[in-house]
Amino acid sequence: MRIVVTNCNTTRSMTEEIVRGARAVASPGTTITGLTPAWGPESAEGWLDSYLSAAAVLDTLRRYEGPYDAVVMAGFGEHGREGARELLDVPVVDITEAAAHLACLLGRRYGVVTTLDRSRGQIEDSLHTAGLAAHCAAVEGTGLGVLDLGDERRTTEAFLAAAQRAVAAGAEVLVLGCAGMTGLRTALARRLAMPVVDGVAAAVRLAESLVALELNTSRTGGYARPLPKRRTWPTGATAG
């Protein structure tokens, strides 16, 4: 089985970290290929970044010519999920949706701990669109930017503080609200003594299940193939 994992930003070191996390949970025989957009934001933190990221990821997937059986979109709360499902002929699993689905199997209400507070709106909207918002007790920010997550100790302490707020709001399960937090799940679950769901791991396992069950995106209704028309795509130039 071949799974492509797309980073939502242009930071290659983050793509490498996401791929390591994906490979750690993938089944024997599953290959993981990471894709990094050639253009877009270096980190997705806000509405502008999210929309730019969505277009860049769709462009990256459109251009990719290697063989693959499923796609994992590794941007928590970022846009583009629905467009990718129209575009591609394989299952598309978004880490936000995947993590929330698994969290709902583990407790009545879940909480998301993410990076900056400004990302909360996109995450809440993504969960609402997926039909999972009613089970979300809280979305809490750590105050750390995406590019600040390399300091594991600092990230862990900030996550624990935000997790306590989510638990106080009624969360029984916690979700790592950023692909850059991949790798922290085990240590955090141990310290919190409650389930912690990593979106990358959840998405990889769900993607494997969909492929194994020969299930694909419905073409009836909302995810019908895009209408044939002329579309102009960017050339990959960068801009500040």
Image: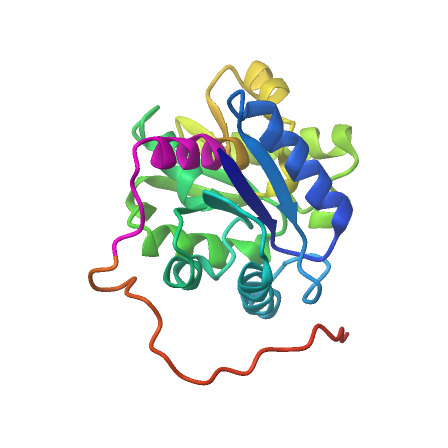
Task: Give the residue displayed 40% in from the left and 49% down from the top.
Answer: 90
Name the residue nearer the viewer: 218 or 214: 214
Decide if residue 176 is in sight here: no
Give percent across and percent down for residue 18.
65, 38
Residue that sits furthest to the left in the current view: 220
Q: Left of 136 or right of it: where is 201? A: right
Above or below residue 14? Residue 196 is: above
Q: Left of 84 or right of it: where is 4? A: right
Q: Is residue 169 magenta?
A: no
Q: How many marks?
A: 0
- Tell me how the rendering is colored: rainbow
Give percent across and percent down for residue 125.
40, 58
Image quadrant in which you'd find residue 157: top right
Above or below residue 192? Residue 93 is: below
Name the residue nearer the viewer: 100 or 133: 100
- Please provide the residue range marked out in magenta: 202-218
Above or below residue 190? Residue 12 is: below
Image quadrant in which you'd find residue 99: top left
Q: Left of 88 or right of it: where is 22? A: right
Please identify the dominant SS of the magenta region: helix
Task: Give the residue displayed 62% in from the left and 41% down from the top.
Answer: 33
Task: Give the residue displayed 71% in from the left and 34% down from the top.
Answer: 155
Name the residue nearer the viewer: 168 or 228: 228
Above or below residue 98? Residue 82 is: below
Give percent across and percent down for residue 154.
76, 33
Decide if residue 82 is in sight here: yes
**Quarter the C terminus occupies:** bottom right
Name the residue nearer the viewer: 189 or 37: 37
Q: Left of 162 or right of it: where is 204? A: left
Give percent across and percent down for residue 105.
31, 27
